Image: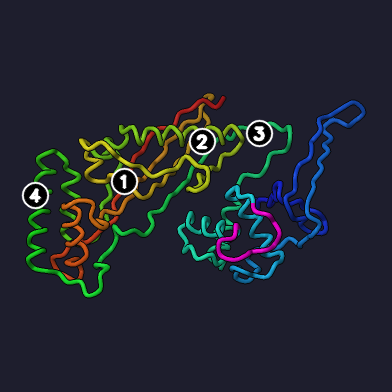
Amino acid sequence: MQRKRQFRILAAVTSGGIILGAATVAGISATSPGQASGQEHVTLTAQSEAFPQVKLGDCPILHVNYPTGGCVAQLQTDLNIIQGNHLAVDGTFGGKGSQTYDAVIAFQTAQGLEPDGMVGPLTKNALETAVASVPADPVPGATPSAPTGFTVTGDIPVGPSQDQDTHDQTPNAKCSVITKAKDQAIAVAAYDYDKLEHHQVGAQLLAHFLGGSGTEVAFPADSEISNEAAASSEFQDLNTSVQDEIVSQLKAGTGDIHLQPPPQATPLKTLDFEDKSSDLYWGFRGTQGLSVSGGGSLQNGSYVGTLTYVIQDSYGFPPGEDNISSAMRYLQTNCGSPQHHDGAHWFPDSITVTVPFDRPAG
């Protein structure tokens, strides 16, 4: 069923269009003597200027200093709904640095789109999808019915980073045979150290990096590193927060649960493994992406199911933090694959963790 758009607080829908401005709910009175049961009194104050309700998909590309009108007003309303912004719904886009421009940049960044401030087809489609996923406001006084089942999705995609560089950023940079040999010796020593200290995943990922294929390495659920991740305090805190949010939405009557990525209020976050005695630190350390999916059903008064997390990362080396990182960076960029047949190359890697979900419905 298509969800009816709710222009909450900042816009009141009337038969003539959208009354725009910083509309304020002055009061919703409860039933009093002489009033019919359930009667509500809502007073909205708003700017007098009105724009017709429009569909963003029918609007031209919106951009800085776009003429004031209903298309920009609709954009402002949608951003307020999706991100909890408090934009004045006045139909004026403004220039770079305006509140509307900054809100568009934040939305594009969160959705993995190019943050150019231009509201073209891709951004419009993402806005329509995001608005449709926002739960509708419940009827005042109504008790939401408990869903008999639920599904969960959420994703923080891995974005571009310096970990993924395949060439040196300095113009005319070259691969010195002498420096390459020295850095390869450092890499071998680091590999031997990881093996000696039982950092098997760290050694495996370093060897794959040096091999230069650039292909993904994905550790499945119930692998040794997956179990180590599941037992870590970082993951357990994340899982507790996610499950608490799922329970909260189930109690509100929502069974189709979409966990939004930052910067919106969300339990989703990337993980930083800081225990240097752990293989997670040497293989992953600060991760760059995360997805969660799963579901379950209502059984004997409890919601029972499973959640699957995919902890995502890019294994590569940004500009050096220490001598080893600097050496690996040189092998990745100045002497990297495919420019050099025996060069190193960054690659995507991930850990899948599956956990049970079992929470009381009450």
For disc 4, the marked residue is 189
For disc 3, the marked residue is 144
Q: CA distance from mark 1 to mark 3?
A: 40 Å
Residue at the bottom extreme of this rendering: 172
The crowd level at tag 4 (other Cα within 10 Å; few <14, some 14-19, many 20+) is few
Where does residue 196 sit, x and y in percent of width and height? Answer: 9, 40
Q: Which mark is residue 286?
A: 1
Q: CA distance from mark 3 to mark 2?
A: 16 Å
Pick the residue in front: 122 or 165: 165
The crowd level at tag 1 (other Cα within 10 Å; few <14, some 14-19, many 20+) is some
Residue type at numbered disc 3:
Pro
Nearest to N terminus: mark 1 or mark 3: 3
Pick the residue in front: 250 or 341: 341
The crowd level at tag 3 (other Cα within 10 Å; few <14, some 14-19, many 20+) is few
Q: CA distance from mark 1 to mark 2?
A: 24 Å
Label 1 with label 4: CB-CB less than 8 Å: no
For disc 2, the marked residue is 245
Nearer the observer, disc 3 or disc 2? 2
Quarter of the image for the C terminus: give it: top right
Q: CA distance from mark 4 to mark 3?
A: 61 Å
Name the image quarter holding residue 250.
top right
Label 4 sits on a secondary structure element that is helix
Determine the residue positioned at 14% across, 38% down: 198
Where does the magenta region start and end? 87-99
Label 3 with label 2: CB-CB less than 8 Å: no
Residue type at numbered disc 1:
Gly
Where does residue 98 sit, x and y in percent of width and height? Answer: 59, 60
Label 1 sits on a secondary structure element that is loop
Tell whether 177 sits left or right of 85: left
Nearest to N terminus: mark 1 or mark 4: 4
Pick the residue in front: 135 or 7: 7
